[in-house]
Amino acid sequence: MLPIGHSLVGLIIYDIFNQKQKWSKNMSYIFMYIFLANLPDGDFIPVILGFDYLNVFHRGLTHTLLFSMIIAALLGAGIKLKDKTSFFDSFPVFFLLIYSHVIIDIFNIDTRPPSGVMALYPLTDQYFHIPLLPPVSHSNLQALLSIANLKTAIFELSLFFPFLLIIFLRQRKNRQS
Ligand SMILES: [Zn+2]
C-alpha cells in the first residue's frame, strides 16, 4: 500500500482513540499518527535516495511483529517519562498504528518473491500474503511516481476515505449534541 492508504488508516485510528478532540487543536498528534502508520516503509528511504539495490530489504524486518512491539514499547516508555502517561495506555495505540501497516501490506499484490510480509516474526518467519489490493511499483523512485501507482493511490483514497469521513462527521455531531 502507498503512504496515502497507510496515512488514512492512521487518521482512522486517531479518530477512534481521540473522539472528543478537535482536529485543529491536535495537529502535532495527528502528524505523529500518520508518521507511525507509515514508519515500516522507512526501509524504502535508501531507495528514494538512489540506492535502488537496497530495495531487496524493503518489507523486511520493519514489517514484522517484532519491530512493531519494540518501537511501540520504546515510544510508550519515552512518553511515560515525558508526560507521565501510563505505558499501558499509550503502548497499544502505538502498536496498533505500526502493526496496522504490517497487516495491510499482507493484502498487497506482491509479485517480487518472497511475496508478502513476515507478519508474525519472530514467532514464525513465514511470509503472509493474501493478494487483494492493487500492487505498488517500488523498484526505484521513478516506479514509485508512475501512473500505475497513481491509479493505486486513487483506489486507496476511495477505499478508506469514506470510513474516515463517516467517523469524522459522527464525532462532530456528537460534540454538537
Ligand atoms: Zn509497507
Image (cartoon, helix red, strand yellow):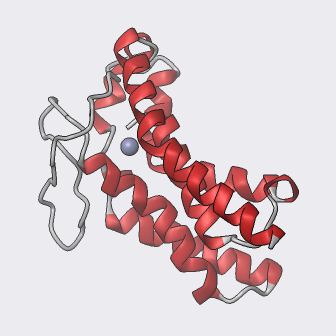
Q: Is residue 66 above or below residue 49?
A: below
Q: Quadrant of residue 173?
A: bottom right
Query: Looking at the picture, how far across and down is residue 52, in whole percent?
Result: 37, 19
Relative placement, left or right, of 161 versus 66 is right
Q: Residue furthest right?
A: 25
Between 150 and 87, the one nearer to me in the picture: 150
Q: Quadrant of residue 17?
A: bottom right
Q: Quadrant of the N terminus?
A: top left
Q: Quadrant of the C terminus?
A: bottom right
Query: Looking at the picture, how far across and down is residue 125, in whole percent?
Result: 15, 61
Between 108 and 20, the one nearer to me in the picture: 20
**Residue 38 seen anywhere in this rendered image of the structure:** no
Q: Report the image quarter containing ligand 1.
A: top left
Between 130 and 64, the one nearer to me in the picture: 130
x 27%, y 30%: residue: 134
x 57%, y 54%: residue: 166
Relative placement, left or right, of 156 versus 74 is left
Q: How many marks?
A: 0
**Residue 45 seen anywhere in this rendered image of the structure:** yes
x 16%, y 54%: residue: 128
Query: Looking at the picture, how far across and down is residue 141, in whole percent?
Result: 45, 16
Relative placement, left or right, of 68 versus 90 is left
x 37%, y 25%: residue: 152
Query: Looking at the picture, how far across and down is residue 30, in whole percent?
Result: 71, 54
